[in-house]
Image (cartoon, coloured by chain):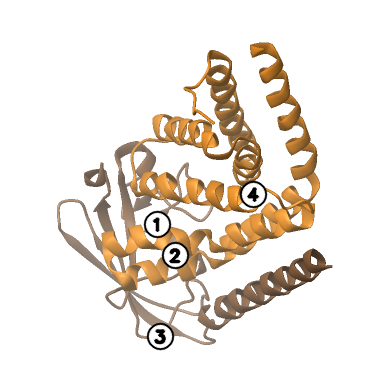
C-alpha cells in the first residue's frame, strides 16, 4: 500500500515536472512577426574580419531566409546545423570549430533555423574555435 | 564480506556490456535523445551495485575514443554514475513503473545536469540559454526513457541476474 502511494506520488511529480518544462518551453519560444522587417547580419570570420549584410524581408524565420540568400549553406551536417557562412566552413566534427549564433550581442537561446526575424535586430554568426577545449 | 578484485569472467562480461551499450546507442542515434544507455546503466547498477561503474566508465571511454574530446566528456564522467548511484539506492524497487519514472526523470533533468559545466565554460547566462534551448530535447529524452524502461527494464534485469548467477556457478 505504501509502495503504491509512493508510485502514485512519483508519477504526479514527474507529470508536474514535465508540465513545468513544457510551459517554460512555450513561454520562452520567440514568436514570429508579420509584415516587412529590416535586420542586420554580421558574419565574423576566422581571421577576425567582419562582413555586414542588411536585409528587408517578409520572411518569418532567419535560417531559411539566409539559406535562400546564399549567405548560409547547410552542407553535410546534422539537421538544424549549418556548415558555411559567407563561404567559410566551420564544422565541429572536422576541425573543432563552429558558427556561434548571437542575437543583439547576446548568445542565442534557439538555433538559427528556429529564430524568427525581428525588425531592427542584429544577428551575428561568429567563427568560434572549440578545439582549444581539448 | 571481503571485497575481491574483478575476476577474468567479470572483466570480460563488463567489457562486453560496455561495448553492447555503446553499440545500442549508435544503432539508436538516428532518434534524437532516444537512447538505451539510461536503461543499461539502471539494469547494471541494480544488479551489480558499485561494480557497475566498471562497465559504465568503459562505455564513457568508448564514447570519448570514438567521438573525441569536448566539454560533454566532463558531463559524462558524473551524469551516468549519478544515475547508477540512484539506481543502487532504489535497487529494491520492484515495480517497473518506478524504474520508468526514475529513467524518465533522469531524461528530463539531463539538460540541467549538464549545466554546471556550461556555467564554468561560459557563465550562467550561457548555461541558462543552452538549457532553455534544449528543453524540447529533454522532453523527448524523458518520454523515450520512460517507455523504454517500462517495457524493457524487468526483462533485462532478470537476464542480467541470470548472467550473474551463471558467472558465480562457473567460479564455484
Q: Nearer the viewer, mark 3 or mark 2?
A: 2
According to the picture, the residue beneath numbered tag 2 turns out to be A112
Dot 3 falls on a residue whose secondary structure is loop
| Letter of the chain in orange | B
Q: From the image, which quarter does the C terminus of chain B lie in? A: top right
According to the picture, the residue beneath numbered tag 3 turns out to be A119
- Residue B58 in percent (x, y) is at 47, 30
Choose the circle earlier in sequence order: 3 or 2.
2
Tell me: A37 left or right of A41. Answer: right
- Residue A65 in percent (x, y) is at 47, 67
- The answer as to whether the residues below labels 1 and 3 share one chain is yes
In terms of depth relative to the viewer, which is nearer, A57 or B80? B80
The chain letter for the residue carrying disc 3 is A
Q: Label 1, label 4: how many angstroms apart (C-alpha)?
A: 29 Å
Q: Colour of chain A?
A: brown
- Residue B66 in percent (x, y) is at 43, 30
According to the picture, the residue beneath numbered tag 4 turns out to be B34
According to the picture, the residue beneath numbered tag 1 turns out to be A72
Q: Quadrant of residue B146?
A: bottom right
Q: Quadrant of residue B119?
A: bottom left
Q: Label 1, label 2: how many angstroms apart (C-alpha)?
A: 10 Å
Q: Label 2, label 4: how many angstroms apart (C-alpha)?
A: 23 Å
The chain letter for the residue carrying disc 2 is A
Choose the circle earlier in sequence order: 1 or 2.
1
Residue B165 sits above or below residue B44 on the image = above
Amino acid at each position: 500500500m505504501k509502495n503504491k502511494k509512493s508510485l502514485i506520488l512519483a508519477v504526479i511529480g514527474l507529470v508536474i515536472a514535465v508540465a513545468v518544462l513544457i510551459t517554460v518551453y512555450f513561454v520562452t519560444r520567440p514568436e514570429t512577426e508579420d509584415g516587412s522587417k529590416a535586420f542586420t547580419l554580421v558574419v565574423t570570420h576566422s581571421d577576425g574580419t567582419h562582413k555586414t549584410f542588411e536585409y528587408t524581408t517578409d520572411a518569418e524565420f532567419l535560417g531559411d531566409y539566409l539559406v535562400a540568400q546564399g549567405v548560409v549553406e547547410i552542407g553535410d551536417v546534422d539537421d538544424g546545423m549549418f556548415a558555411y557562412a559567407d563561404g567559410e566552413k566551420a564544422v565541429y566534427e572536422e576541425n573543432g570549430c563552429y558558427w556561434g549564433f548571437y542575437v543583439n550581442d547576446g548568445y542565442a537561446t534557439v538555433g538559427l533555423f528556429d529564430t524568427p526575424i525581428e525588425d531592427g535586430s542584429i544577428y551575428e554568426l561568429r567563427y568560434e574555435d572549440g578545439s582549444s577545449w581539448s | 564480506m571481503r571485497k575481491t578484485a574483478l575476476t577474468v569472467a567479470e572483466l570480460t562480461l563488463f567489457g562486453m556490456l560496455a561495448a553492447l551499450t555503446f553499440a545500442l546507442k549508435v544503432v539508436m542515434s538516428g532518434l534524437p535523445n532516444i537512447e538505451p544507455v539510461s536503461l543499461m546503466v539502471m539494469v547494471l547498477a541494480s544488479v551489480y551495485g558499485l561494480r557497475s561503474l566498471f562497465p559504465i566508465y568503459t562505455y564513457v571511454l568508448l564514447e570519448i575514443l570514438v567521438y573525441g574530446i569536448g566539454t560533454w566528456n566532463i558531463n559524462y564522467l558524473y551524469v551516468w554514475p549519478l544515475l547508477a548511484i540512484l539506481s543502487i539506492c532504489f535497487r529494491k524497487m520492484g515495480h517497473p513503473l518506478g524504474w520508468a519514472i526514475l529513467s524518465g526523470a533522469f531524461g528530463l533533468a539531463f539538460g540541467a545536469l549538464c549545466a554546471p559545466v556550461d556555467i564554468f565554460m561560459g557563465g550562467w547566462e550561457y548555461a541558462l540559454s543552452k538549457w532553455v534551448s534544449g528543453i524540447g530535447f529533454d522532453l523527448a529524452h524523458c518520454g523515450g526513457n520512460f517507455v523504454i524502461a517500462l517495457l524493457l527494464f524487468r526483462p533485462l534485469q532478470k537476464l542480467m541476474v541470470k548472467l550473474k548467477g551463471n558467472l558465480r556457478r562457473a567460479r564455484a
